[in-house]
Amino acid sequence: MTARTVFELRLRRPRSPVLPLVLFFVMLAVTVTFVAYVLWPTWPKAVTALDGPSLPVVIAGVLFNVPPAAIRASVQRQPGAHERIDLVLLWPSLVPPPAEGTVSADAPVSSDSNPAPPKNSNDRLFVTIAGLGSVLPPAERLRSVYPRYFDSRATPANDGLAVLQFRSGTPYEGEDLIYPADEPDRFFARCTRETVRPVPATCIHERLLDGAEIMIRFPRAWLQDWRGVVAGFDRLASQLHQQAGATESTKDNR
């Protein structure tokens, strides 16, 4: 066999598949690393001061001005667009509660012989603002969804309110729909019922502001002064969104 024949055989010998596979996996690793670096969620390192000015927050295209001390999750204490934001405010002042580790002017003083009582959870207003998404607006739910699950006719309650109970076995089991008997479009709330458990009954009031839904959770006992509650919620909407006055907020629930 001549040297030329040996050279031709070597040229016809199939190449080893190891090198292309190594190159493929190297390129794949580089691509995955780049995509992970670009898409990996990051949070600003700067910490927003709780006593700083209100933050401009955009939710579902709606601009809100939110005091940072009222935002419950530290990761949400940044200006810009958010999917949702969770707040806590004192009632009826609608100001943020004292920060952890600080003492308010009216806080009880504790001592070894006279310990301070626990914080009063009935003075807290919990607010969630999020995009409405595919959920029906609150007014539409009032007209077309809730009536399917009522147990009986409305019964009168104190100060012109009416109460409709939801049937057992429904998504709203154990809840009541409470609203002014003469003005159901003005205000309505879904409330849990009072039980022997130490957990107080709570209510949820929802109102729509363009594409954003404001969900307010509060103790049912506050409805003893429901007119003051409605006025406070209107004031809250105006406080968070400067263009939302009491008249517009009422109109959104119709």
Image (tube, grey):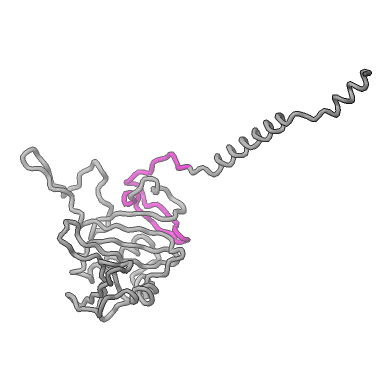
| Direction from residue 5 to residue 63 in the image, left or right | left
In the displayed structure, would residue 14 be above or below residue 55?
Answer: above
Please give the name of the residue rendered at 17% of the width and 48% of the height, measured from the top-left corner: 105
Of all residues, the one furthest to the left in this rendering is 113
- Nearest the viewer among 95 and 87 is 87
> Quadrant where the N terminus lies?
top right
Q: Does any portion of residue 142 appear in the rendered image?
A: yes
Please give the name of the residue rendered at 20% of the width and 54% of the height, measured from the top-left corner: 121
- Nearest the viewer among 190 and 158 is 190
* Label total for image: 0
> Quadrant where the C terminus lies?
bottom left
Residue 45 counted in the magenta span: yes
| Direction from residue 41 to residue 156 in the image, left or right | left
What stretch of residues is rendered in magenta? 42-71
Image quadrant assignment for residue 84: bottom left
Q: Does any portion of residue 251 appear in the rendered image?
A: no
- Nearest the viewer among 9 and 236 is 9
Residue 221 x %, y %: 18, 65
Please give the name of the residue rendered at 34% of the width and 61% of the height, measured from the top-left corner: 239
Image quadrant assignment for residue 231: bottom left
Of all residues, the one furthest to the front in this rendering is 1
Residue 116 x %, y %: 12, 45
| Direction from residue 34 to residue 155 in the image, left or right | left
Residue 251 counted in the magenta span: no
In the displayed structure, would residue 21 be above or below residue 209?
Answer: above
Residue 43 x %, y %: 45, 42
- Nearest the viewer among 71 and 29 is 29
Please give the name of the residue rendered at 16% of the width and 56% of the height, measured from the top-left corner: 198
In the displayed structure, would residue 89 be above or below residue 23?
Answer: below
Residue 142 x %, y %: 35, 74
